[in-house]
Amino acid sequence: MDVLRNKARDLLAQGQAQVVIGYEAGTGGARRPSFVRSEADVARLVWDADCVGNLAGYLTRAEIKKMGKIAVVANAATLRALLQLTAEHQLAEGAVSALVVTEEGAVLELSNAQAVTEHVATLPASLSAADREKLDQLMALSREERRAFWEQELQRCIKCYACRSSCPMCYCGSCTMDCNRPQWVPVASHEMGNLEYHTVRAMHLAGRCVECGECGRACPVGIPIHLLTCYAEESVRRQFGQPAGTSATLNYALGTFRPDDQETFIR
């Protein structure tokens, strides 16, 4: 932990970063985001197995960008989100440095997309073993069974939008869910409105979800909603061979025109 703090202190002192986004101790032993802007605040930074939150969601916010050059303490999910955000032109090349704490306790500074790409290529699968098992079980169901599963789960949704707010890939300034002229998705928390909201969100994340699980952790009623976006992501991966969060130059599969596409609708 001292190595990480010393690195953050050096970056701030040398002007190589104006803010270091990392983790600090929260209530009940939890870890929460920490925005360190002075050397005196560096002592707040912590790093352990509980630092699972995806901090990339803060990087596209205007108030954060105004702080200047950013360094972010990055776990695997944050690194993947960094690449996907760069690929979607939401982050400029070199605007963010990633600080990676290795198993040996050293700190790697990845200052460009190429370095992040090479490091991500060495990482294991993003889904936990428990989520992988649950997702495989869902994928083995028939279409009708999957629909019944999600209809039952989504009945508990209270439309708080915590899943949207916590997702690093939900960065639109104006969301379809908030549009009321016309109103595309019902606001009320009822069966049809909930199903439409989560279906639209999953489709927007298809081929883009970095499988960090942040939306599922944020859900106050315990809906495993991250499994829906992971399912959409892996469906695109199977059909197009394009995993999200692995390159800063990938084109979004569902937003890319290719004249040699085999589907007849493209012609």
Image (cartoon, rainbow, N blue to C red):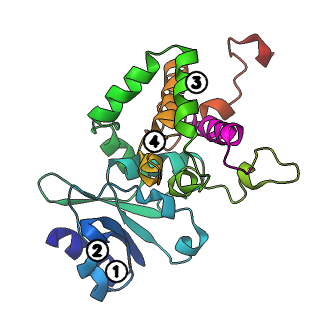
Asked if the residues shown at circle 4 and circle 1 are in contact, with their CB atoms under 8 angstroms apart, the answer is no
- Disc 4 designates what residue? 210
Q: Amino acid at mark 1?
A: Leu
- Disc 3 designates what residue? 147
Mark 2 element type: helix
Asked if the residues shown at circle 2 and circle 4 are in contact, with their CB atoms under 8 angstroms apart, the answer is no
Q: Which comes sooner in the sequence, label 2 or label 4? A: 2
Mark 4 element type: loop
Where does the image place residue 163, in percent across and percent down from the top left? 53, 51
Q: Which residues are magenta?
A: 187-208
* Residue 210 found in image quarter: top left
Mark 1 element type: helix
Q: CA distance from mark 1 to mark 2?
A: 6 Å
Location of residue 103 with respect to 244 vertically, above or below: below
* Residue 90 found in image quarter: bottom right
Asked if the residues shown at circle 3 and circle 4 are in contact, with their CB atoms under 8 angstroms apart, the answer is no
Instruction: Give the left or right position of residue 158, taking residue 192 as reference.
Output: left
Q: Which comes sooner in the sequence, label 2 or label 3? A: 2
- Disc 1 designates what residue? 12
Quadrant of the image for the N terminus? bottom left
Q: Amino acid at mark 4?
A: Val
Q: Residue at x 48, y 27 (%)?
A: 234
Q: Which comes sooner in the sequence, label 3 or label 1? A: 1
User: Badge 1, how many Cα within 10 Å: few under 14, some, many 20+?
Assistant: many
Q: Which mark is residue 8?
A: 2
Q: Amino acid at mark 3?
A: Arg
Q: Is residue 17 visible?
A: no
Q: Is residue 179 visible?
A: yes
Q: Is residue 54 magenta?
A: no
Q: Residue furthest right?
A: 181
Location of residue 231 with respect to 52 vertically, above or below: above
Q: Main secondary structure of the magenta part?
A: helix
